Amino acid sequence: MNICATILWNRTERLIPVLAMGRRPLIGTALLEDYHLSIDFCEGGTVLVDDIM
């Protein structure tokens, strides 16, 4: 069974496949192609996703 979700990504609606592992659906890192991801792994840390192009 193929399950898809519609998300708003960079002000554009995109249809993406959703994989389920146990009870939690996952959205893969394929969405991050052509983007830079920065994560501060601490309580209250920031997550930044910037367009590379």
Image: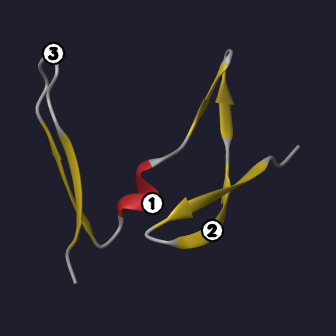
Residue 18 occupies which quadrant of the picture? top right
Relative horizontal placement of residue 32, taking residue 8 as reference (left or right): left
Task: State which tag comes first along the sequence, 1 or 3.
Answer: 1
Residue 14 badge: 2
The C terminus lies in quadrant: bottom left
Q: Nearer the viewer, residue 3 or 53?
A: 53
Residue shown at 49% from the left, 72% from the top: 11
Relative horizontal placement of residue 19, taking residue 26 as reference (left or right): right
Q: Nearer the viewer, residue 42 or 29?
A: 42
SS assignment at label 3: loop
Relative horizontal placement of residue 3, taking residue 37 as reference (left or right): right
The image shows residue 33 at horizontal and vertical percentages of 35, 67
Residue shown at 45% from the left, 60% from the top: 31
Residue 49 badge: none
Task: State which tag comes first along the sequence, 2 or 3.
Answer: 2
Q: Nearer the viewer, residue 15 or 44?
A: 44
Residue at mark 1: 31
Q: CA distance from mark 2 to mark 3?
A: 31 Å
The image shows residue 10 at horizontal and vertical percentages of 43, 69
Q: CA distance from mark 1 to mark 3?
A: 25 Å
Residue shown at 16% from the left, 21% from the top: 44
Residue 43 badge: 3
Relative horizontal placement of residue 51, taking residue 15 as reference (left or right): left
Are discs 2 and 1 less than 8 Å apart at CB? yes
The N terminus lies in quadrant: top right
